[in-house]
Image (cartoon, rainbow, N blue to C red):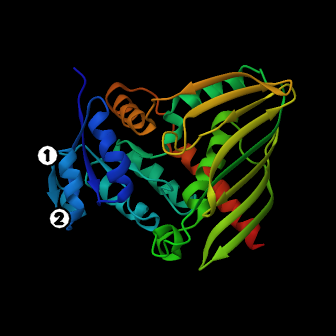
Amino acid sequence: MTKTVRWGILGAAHFAKQHMAPAMQLARNTELVALGTSDGAKAAPFKALAPGLKVHSSYDAVLNDPDIDAVYIPLPNHLHVAWVKKAIAAGKHVLCEKPIAMQASDIDELIALRDSAGLMLVEAYMIVHHPQWQYAKALFESGVIGDLVQVDGVFSYNNAEDVANIRNRPDTGGGSLPDIGVYTFGSARYVTGQEPEAILDATITWENGVDVWAGVTAQFPGFRFMGVTSMRMDARQEMNFHGTSGFIRLTAPFNPQVFGQAEVELHQGGEAKHVKRFPNENHYTRQLEAFQASLNEGEDYPCPLEFSQGTQRMIDQVFRKARG
């Protein structure tokens, strides 16, 4: 009989309320058991989803709850490493929001802790669980677009009015690259299986100590990558894998259903030859089910810490290039 993974959430984050808590109610063999928050008003929407939810007044109380198998950490970026360490020390499996660390070198210790504790510890990089990305990867690997020449992508939104947002604050690890650069960089790495050889250009616009626009050009072994992330432009997202015989376009690559319907287009000869649509898939639900399958059934997890470290290493390289 498949064992249910019982989850606790550290903090009543808006993202947890909107996406992860509902996904925990929908995912197979998954149960939301506890929440850590001292704010009753913030706890109310979670209790509406899961009436039997235990609400603990502190994060430590969640970690000490014997009824919890795993914790989800949606805290501000600068708190991730510290609370991951505490969760592992408490014997809990961990799913931590991205970026799991603010620099790649910090992930070395997390990998060592994961291995020594024998616990599951992964970053919540949900897009690799979506079938549109699995399909895009398989399509690329089929060779249908010929030799890959260029990968380009953009991910933007505008939160300029939300000054207090943690993404707009340097003290909480804000910025467009930590928040959404992981998607443009990571998806290029995921589909191609390649790592950047050099950051050729990194142009960044800064506000209040955080990057609000970043344009990056990188050389990979077999192609050139060009990406833009921004927190000061109207919402847009797109990824393209362009080869000598065609190109693959993902029209809602990073948050389908919110931004638009997930579609993977194959273009050849100047026209769309084939479009595959994924209207109802929920990558948060699939992420939780993959976590359970890896934990209890030994299945390979699509995004181990080593993969997350590779993306963070690229982000670190971009910041170093931009700062000269």
Q: Residue furthest bottom?
A: 208
In the image: residue 47, left or right of residue 73: left
- Residue under pointer 2: 40
Q: Nearer the viewer, residue 183 or 198?
A: 183
Name the residue: 24% across, 62% down: 42
Name the residue: 61% across, 23% down: 276
User: Where is residue 169 drawn, in percent x and y?
Assistant: 51, 74
Vertical relation: 26 (above or below) 79: above
Name the residue: 80% across, 26% down: 271
Task: Note whether residue 312 is visible.
Answer: no
User: Which element is circle 1 on?
Assistant: loop
Identify residue type, mark 1. Answer: Pro
Task: Note whether residue 100 is visible.
Answer: yes
Name the residue: 59% across, 52% down: 182
Q: Earlier in the sequence, mark 2 or mark 1?
A: 2
User: Where is residue 164 drawn, in percent x and y?
Assistant: 45, 75
User: Which element is circle 2 on?
Assistant: helix
| Image quadrant in which you'd find residue 248 | top right
Which image quarter holds the C terminus? Answer: bottom right
Q: What numbered label is drawn on residue 51?
A: 1
User: Where is residue 290 drawn, in percent x and y?
Assistant: 40, 32
Vertical relation: 310 (above or below) 26: below
Q: Nearer the viewer, residue 275 or 285?
A: 275
In the image: residue 82, left or right of residue 3: right
Which image quarter holds the N terminus? Answer: top left
